[in-house]
Each structure stands twice: as structure tokens, then as C-alpha cells.
Image (cartoon, rainbow, N blue to C red):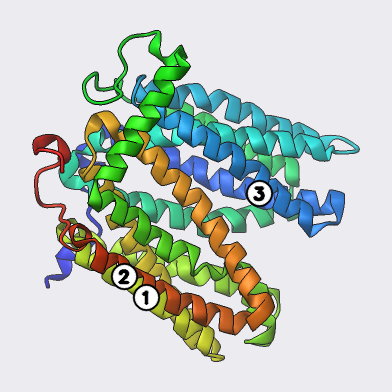
């Protein structure tokens, strides 16, 4: 295979000014969001002295996020997607500003953090499906894998830079400065969106908007959600994509066990914990940088990538040699990047434009809930078996579940990005 074919495909950035604007705004704002996540955890622990409150702030964001995603999926198929993204940015800026002001008070209030965190979850959910559904319109269905790889690379780079920068800022200028940087990043995203062309909804297809008043009609909104659910339920490929993603996330999410593993398995402290968190992101960045070939990949590569994730984590749980453990975590991150790129591209490729908002919202609900369930299940299993045994068991179950899903859904194994998109061929 020529080396040039491995390089990340930058065509979406070169060929679409609007995608460049959306991508740059998203990447910059995400770094600020992840900085704020670290700041919130540190501040909540300082105010409460309770790790439980840190977990509850995560729940305070996740529950409104799910509600917002479901509503946002309907809205993304009924109103201009650019306008929806623009409408959700100013309240996010205000929430970040409220956190900054609260941090400057002589006695910061815990309830302000909970309210602001819940509001950011709701607003991120409302705008998220519009962001995903807009990408095929901006880059074309032939470049979905490349656009997915670029988005995943930006996410992983932010996962490396955001927490690190947040820690430096918290130790230096302080929490308020960290929150203020988040507000500035969101403002920059809003400015970038002003220059993106309008992205009106498609007025044909099941559940499409019928006029300016339909967004206020609760019955029609529920009908629109039901139309999305019916489409997903009747589409074997999309069901397979959802299930294989669940196999990867629900059974094998070891992040909650990293502190325990660092102490018991590798005999280290916080420094080792940091390396464990960073290793998958590093592997994902390598995968993104060499993702050019994924535009020709299909379902069989997706199955292999999820299996690589599970097998790598199984090996990670079995070894006590830190360099090998980090290498295996990097391989797991590589497999996750490839599977994420292909899952997203195949989902958008197989969904009619008129339903992309709602289907993307269902995808985001799973992407929010599955990792949370995965970390919880791994933690619960570790209570009975120990951390190492829990990771090994989870990895093996992930591989087994992946193979079962692949066997049960031939449409998943044979899926391809090279054929006609959903709107250019009859629906399954």
C-alpha cells in the first residue's frame, strides 16, 4: 500500500470553506469545554471534599444532555441547522461566564456549578445533532470517512491538550481564568458559524417539517421522533452499528479503574495514572494521522477495529509491564479511532438527509449513555473480581459480543462507503 494512501485525507478541509469554519470552531471550543471539565471537578472537590459530588456533577450534565439530544434531533430536521447551532452558543457562553463569576466570589456556591453544568449539557445536546447532520451537506457523502477522521482527531487532540492546559491554568491564574477561556472559545465558534452558509432542512420524507408552526406542536414532535425510531428499527445496518458500538462501550470502559490499576498493577501514583489516560488518545491520534485508507473501508474493517479494541484491553489487563501496557492502550485507542470513524461515516451514508438529525440524536444518546454504563459496570465487576480480572473479562466479553453482532447482521459486515448514499438508492 503506498504511503501516500495512509496519510490523513484533508480533502474536506481543502474543498469546503464552510467545513473549515465549522471544524475550527468545534476544535477550539472543545478544548475549552474539556478545560472546564477539569476545573469543575477540582472546584467541586475543593468546595465539598466529596468525590461523590464530582460524580453527581457528571450526572447533572448527562441527564439534560440526553433530553437535549432527543429534542435537538427533531429540531435539526425541522429548522436551519446553522441557526440552531447559533442559537445554542450564547447561552453556553453565559453559563461559562457564570462559572467564572462564581469562582471569583469569596464563597463560591456549589449550586451554581450544578445549574451551569446541567444547562451546558442541555444546550450541547440541542446543538449536537445539528452539528453531525450538517457534515454530509458540507463535505458530500463521498468524504464522510475523511470528515469523521478529522473530527475524531480534533477530539483526541483536545482530550490531550484540554485537561493539561486546564491543570496549568488552575494552578496559575486560577479557576475563573479557565472558565473565561472556555467562554472565549465558545464566542469564537459563534463568530465562525456566522460565516457558514445556511443549512435548511429537507421538507420531504417521514417526519419532515411542514411549516413554521410545526416545531410547537408536541404531537408532531413525538411523531417525528417515532419516525426516526421506525427508520432505525427497520434498517439492519444501523441497528448493527448501534449494537457493535454498545459492545465496545458497555463491556469495556476501564477508565474508572485506572487509579486502582496504577497502584496495584504498576506500583505507581498520579504520574502513572496520567500516562494510562494519555496512551489511548495518543494511539487515536496516530490512527487519525494515517486514516486516509478508511474512505475505501467497510463493515469488515469496523468489526476488526472493535475486536482490536477488546483484545488490546484484554492484554492490558493481563500485563504488569508498564511499557507493554501503554502500547496496548495505544493500540486500543487506534482501534477505537478507526471504529468511530467508520461507524459515523456508515451511519450518515445510510441515512436519508431528512432523517439525519433524528438518527444522529439517537446515536448521541447511545454515545452518552454507553460509556457511562461501561465505567459503572467495570467498577461494579471490579468490586467482586478485582480490577485486573474485570478488565480482562470485559475485553473478552467485548470481542465475543462483537463477533455475535457481526454474525447476526450480515448487512454490517458487507457495508461499504463506496456505494450510493441513502438518498440515491431505495431504502432497505
Q: Nearer the viewer, residue 279 or 24?
A: 279
Q: Name the residue at 27% across, 72% down.
A: 304
Q: Does the image show residue 80?
A: yes
Q: Which quadrant would the C terminus be assigned to in this image?
A: top left
- Dots 2 and 3: beta carbons under 8 Å? no
Residue 178 x %, y %: 67, 44
Which residue is identified by label 1?
A: 400
Which of the numbered marks, if any, corresponds to residue 58?
3
Q: Which quadrant would the N terminus be assigned to in this image?
A: bottom left
Q: Name the residue at 65% across, 36% down.
A: 118
SS category of the residue bearing label 1: helix
Q: Name the residue at 46% across, 82% down.
A: 314
Q: Residues within 10 Å of mark 2 (few under 14, many from 20)?
A: few
Q: Is residue 152 above or below residue 182?
A: below
- Dots 2 and 1: beta carbons under 8 Å? yes
Which residue is identified by label 2?
A: 404
Which of the numbered marks, if any, corresponds to residue 174?
none
Residue 13 x %, y %: 26, 43
Q: Name the residue at 59% across, 70% down.
A: 378
Separation of residues labelled 2 and 3 (CA atoms): 32 Å
Q: Nearer the viewer, residue 77 or 156?
A: 77
Amino acid at each position: 500500500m503506498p504511503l501516500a494512501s495512509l496519510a490523513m485525507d484533508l480533502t474536506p478541509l481543502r474543498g469546503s470553506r464552510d467545513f473549515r469554519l465549522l471544524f475550527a470552531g468545534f476544535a477550539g471550543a472543545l478544548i475549552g469545554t474539556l478545560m472546564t471539565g477539569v476545573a469543575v471537578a477540582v472546584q467541586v472537590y475543593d468546595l465539598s471534599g466529596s468525590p461523590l459530588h464530582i460524580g453527581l456533577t457528571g450526572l447533572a450534565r448527562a441527564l439534560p444532555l440526553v433530553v437535549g439530544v432527543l429534542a435537538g434531533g427533531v429540531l435539526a430536521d425541522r429548522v436551519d441547522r446553522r441557526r440552531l447551532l447559533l442559537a445554542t452558543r450564547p447561552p453556553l457562553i453565559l453559563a461559562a461566564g457564570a462559572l467564572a463569576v462564581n469562582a471569583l466570589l469569596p464563597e463560591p456556591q456549589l449550586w451554581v456549578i450544578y445549574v451551569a453544568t446541567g444547562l451546558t449539557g442541555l444546550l450541547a445536546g440541542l446543538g449536537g445533532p445539528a452539528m453531525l447532520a450538517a457534515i454530509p451537506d458540507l463535505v458530500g457523502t463521498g468524504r464522510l470517512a475523511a470528515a469523521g477522521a478529522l473530527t475524531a482527531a480534533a477530539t483526541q487532540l483536545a482530550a490531550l491538550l484540554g485537561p493539561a492546559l486546564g491543570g496549568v491554568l488552575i494552578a496559575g491564574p486560577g479557576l475563573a481564568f479557565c472558565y473565561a477561556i472556555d467562554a472565549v472559545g465558545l464566542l469564537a465558534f459563534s463568530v465562525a458559524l456566522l460565516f457558514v452558509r445556511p443549512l435548511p432542512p429537507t421538507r420531504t420524507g417521514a417526519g419532515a417539517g411542514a411549516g413554521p408552526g410545526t416545531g410547537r406542536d408536541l404531537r408532531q414532535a413525538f411523531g417525528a421522533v417515532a419516525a426516526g425510531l421506525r427508520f432505525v428499527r427497520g434498517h439492519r445496518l444501523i441497528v448493527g452499528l448501534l449494537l457493535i458500538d454498545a459492545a465496545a462501550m458497555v463491556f469495556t470502559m476501564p477508565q474508572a479503574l485506572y487509579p486502582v490499576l496504577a497502584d496495584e498493577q504498576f506500583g505507581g501514583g498520579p504520574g502513572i495514572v496520567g500516562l494510562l489516560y494519555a496512551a489511548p488518545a495518543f494511539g487515536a491520534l496516530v490512527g487519525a494521522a494515517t486514516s486516509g485508507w478508511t474512505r475505501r473501508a467497510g463493515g469488515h474493517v469496523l468489526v476488526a477495529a472493535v475486536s482490536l479494541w477488546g483484545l488490546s484491553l484484554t492484554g492490558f489487563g493481563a500485563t504488569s509491564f508498564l511499557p507493554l501496557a501503554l502500547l496496548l492502550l495505544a493500540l486500543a485507542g487506534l482501534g477505537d479511532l478507526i471504529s468511530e470513524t467508520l461507524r459515523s461515516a456508515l451511519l450518515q451514508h445510510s441515512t436519508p438527509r431528512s432523517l439525519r438529525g433524528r438518527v444522529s440524536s439517537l446515536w448521541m444518546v447511545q454515545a452518552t449513555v454507553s460509556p457511562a454504563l461501561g465505567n459503572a459496570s467495570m467498577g461494579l465487576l471490579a468490586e467482586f473480581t478485582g480490577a485486573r480480572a474485570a478488565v480482562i473479562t470485559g475485553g473478552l466479553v467485548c470481542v465475543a459480543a462483537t463477533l455475535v453482532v457481526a454474525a447476526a447482521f450480515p448487512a454490517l459486515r458487507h457495508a461499504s462507503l463506496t456505494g450510493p448514499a441513502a438518498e440515491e438508492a431505495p431504502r432497505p
